Image (spheres, rainbow, N blue to C red):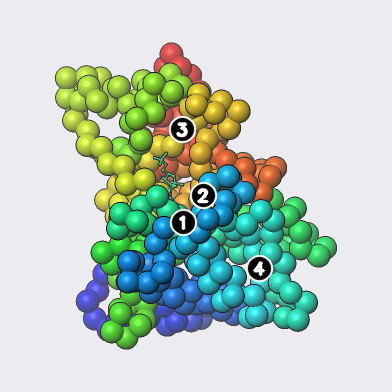
Amino acid sequence: MSKTKAISLTQYLIEQQREAELIPSQLRLLIEVVARACKRIAISVNKGALGDVLGTAGTENVQGEVQKKLDVIANEVLIEANEWGGHLAGMASEEMDDIYAVPNRYPQGEYLLLFDPLDGSSNIDVNVSIGTIFSVLKHTDGHAVDASSFLQAGSKQVAAGYCVYGPQTTLVLTVGKGVVMFTLDREQGSWVLTQDKVKIPEDTKEFAINMSNMRHWAPPVKRYIDENLAGKEGPRGKDFNMRWVASMVADVHRILTRGGVFLYPWDKREPDKPGKLRLLYEANPMSFLVEQAGGASTNGIQRILDIEPIKLHERVAVILGSKNEVERVTAYHRDPVA
Ligand code: P6P
């Protein structure tokens, strides 16, 4: 990244539109509104115990998970910031049972916004990085927006990104032509371009998985992790390192920054569920970003972006990151004796 004049998010989006006609004005407005909402969420996150934002909200979401106060705050911020602008037909959130159609008092737009308003909630009260994940689709079904409007394969996304609330507040974005990163300049209150060519190395020595679930994994995952743990003396011929933040945003950000492979596979604790993570709000946006940065993302069998969703809140197994490692894990699933 050149260290010359700071480029703001607005300048980047306008120049992308001018040079590549990549970002129509409604999409530019959408991205800027979401980025501004993330700044607002960062203010609440950073208050911690000084604001009334920690602890639980006393409610459960559609997943049956206890909602944290910040889950609810972040969801409300995103809804209120986006409903009036005329760029959206509707929104869907991991924290809401059904979709949110833009009220008739506002103009309807051509885009659909999906989000996990605050990913990694279990880390809020212990001051570990959390984030907001968002995904953008076009409203193409020609009828009034309803849940079916959102059931599009991840390959139909026109934009995706996340904001990680960590030591830095960083916005990571793709509109289908690579991945860029913006760091929040708190003195100016603006997003400044800090990485314009994000690339994931095809090989890595670092994997991310919740090892406490080992006894529940399917054989291909157990084989892959056992081989990594065997290190230099084992079939991989090299030592591996392990990381698990329990915030997908933080683990994916590390992988986009220095490579690695992230696994949240199917396991036999809840055999009827394909995985823990949500297809529309976590797996699809993260898979779009990872592929745009030269990585890969599968559910062990197929490319995640090819999965045709059946339900708004369906879950999926996720293996994403450095291409050669994802391909190895996927090969073990496809041909267990390979
Ligand atoms: P576990 C956070 O709740 C999340 O959805 C992801 O951000 C994260 O990767 C995963 O769940 C952590 O799950 O079972 O390790 O707590």
Give whichever of discs 1 and 3 has the lower sequence position: 1
Distance from Cα at disc 2 to Cα at disc 3: 23 Å
Above or below residue 302? Residue 29 is below
The image quarter containing residue 127 is: bottom left
Q: Which comes sooner in the sequence, label 1 or label 2?
A: 1
Q: Position of residue 41 (x, y in %)?
A: 44, 70
Residue occupying the point 30% across, 22% down = 226
4 and 1 marks in contact (CB < 8 Å): no
Examine the rendering and report whether any part of residue 293 can be seen: no
Circle on res. 111 = 4
Query: Are the residues flagged by discs 1 and 2 in contact, CB closer than 8 Å?
Result: yes
Q: Quadrant of ligand 1?
A: top left
Give the label, 4 or 1, closer to the camera. 1
Say few, some or many: other residues with alpha carbon within 10 Å of mark 1 (under 14 / 14 to 19 / 20 or more): some
Q: Which residue is mark 2?
A: 66
Compared across the picture, whether 266 is left or right of 186 comes to right
Q: Earlier in the sequence, mark 4 or mark 2?
A: 2
Left or right: 157 in relation to 207: right
User: Looking at the picture, which amino acid does disc 2 mark?
Assistant: Val
Q: Which mark is residue 166?
A: none
Identify which residue, 21 or 97, lies in the foreground: 97
> Marks 3 and 1: in contact by CB < 8 Å?
no
- Is disc 3's CB within 8 Å of ligand 1? no
| Residue 162 screen position, x and y as percent | 44, 61
Mark 4 to mark 1: distance in Å? 32 Å
Q: Residue at x 48, y 19 (%)?
A: 335
Residue under numbered circle 3:
265
Disc 1 secondary structure class: strand
From the viewer's perspective, is residue 133 above or below residue 274?
Answer: below
